[in-house]
Amino acid sequence: MDGWRYVIEDILVFLKKEMNAILMLLFVFVVGTIGYGKIDGWQHSPIDYLYMTFITVSTIGYGEIVHIDTVEGRIFTIVISILGIGLFGYIFSKLTAYLFDRELHEKWKRRKMIENIKNLKDHAIVCEGFQGYTPYVIDELRKSKIPFVVIGENEKAVEKFISRFGEMYHLVDSCIEDEALLRANIRKAKYLFALSHDDNINLLASVSAKFLKPEIKIVARCKNHEFIRKCKHIGVDFAISPEYLGGKLLAYEAIRPTVAHFLEDMFEKKIIHEGIGFDEVIVTSKWHGKRLLDLPLRNLSQVLIIALKRKKETLYNPKREMKMQENDILIVSGSLEEIRKLKELMTS
């Protein structure tokens, strides 16, 4: 139904654009109807004379009602034909070109995409950075079956990115503009990735996102390691410097190669294929005030609690006597099957 609505809307735009030619053609039809009526002595209905005008103007010439056997009638038909055929052909060709124009189809496609974006929920918004880490972020989102919208200001860069990595919801706009974020349905979004090569853009995009939806989870790329502190100050949940982490990993390759290889396997998900991985478990109200040692980890011997995140503070290797609070996040590693059971235990 939306497709037909767009077609009707664009036809109305076309009619407004070509209004002068359409009014002239209507004038020809009125004159033709009246003229043929007078020539024939009004022996038929006005609809018949309108039909006579139409088959003359459209060059159909089939089913003539008025037999033109006078000089005046033939001259009148010539004048109507010259005026009407030209106008009719002009409007018909313009309408055909308009409806089959590639840009118009792209316009309909964009409208449909915006309608679909409005229906998204718990999705991710990915801002800029098409030549950096964005492909890897999108790959993980697709594997996790999380819908996403890409926002980029450079139209050619966006088109090139889509041609390389496949169709996706996208907006050609500035991610620091509130209007662009609203079009990306930020009020229903769950994540925002600020991945521009410009730290200032990432900072501004994060501020705009937090203003529109304070509870949204933001991950920001910081080229300059010093920007991490600024991002955290404005409420960014995770500020990461890939250059900093990459440098650390390169050093680990030489100094602690076993650790480096383990991290590589983790990110390449090789260990996940063996049923081992990392995940986060959210503490529910049922376990509020209880200690970590109250968790039945004896029955889940292959689950290890690495850290506990409480609001903006992360406690590594937390003590077993530590009391949990609702919405604490337990960062765990171990058997994926037993991690799943722990999540079920939290909610059951």
Image (spheres, rainbow, N blue to C red):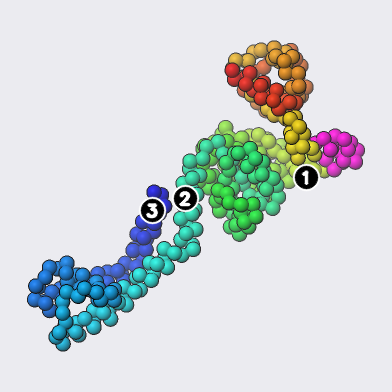
What's the mark number on residue 4? 3
Q: Is residue 226 visible?
A: no
Nearest to the observer: residue 207 or residue 174? 174
Horizontal and vertical percent for residue 135? 67, 48
Q: Which residue is mark 1?
A: 243
174 sits left or right of 221 in the view = left
- Prevailing SS of the magenta stretch: helix
**Quadrant in which the C terminus appears:** top right
For label 2, the SS is helix
> Which quarter of the picture shows residue 283?
top right
Q: Which secondary structure, mark 3?
A: helix
* Residue 28 appears left or right of 121: left
Asked whether 252 falls inside the magenta stretch, the response is yes
Residue density around tag 1, few if under 14, some if 14–19, many if 20 or more, within 10 Å: some
Left or right, 212 with reference to 314: left
Residue 311, x across and y down, in percent: 65, 26
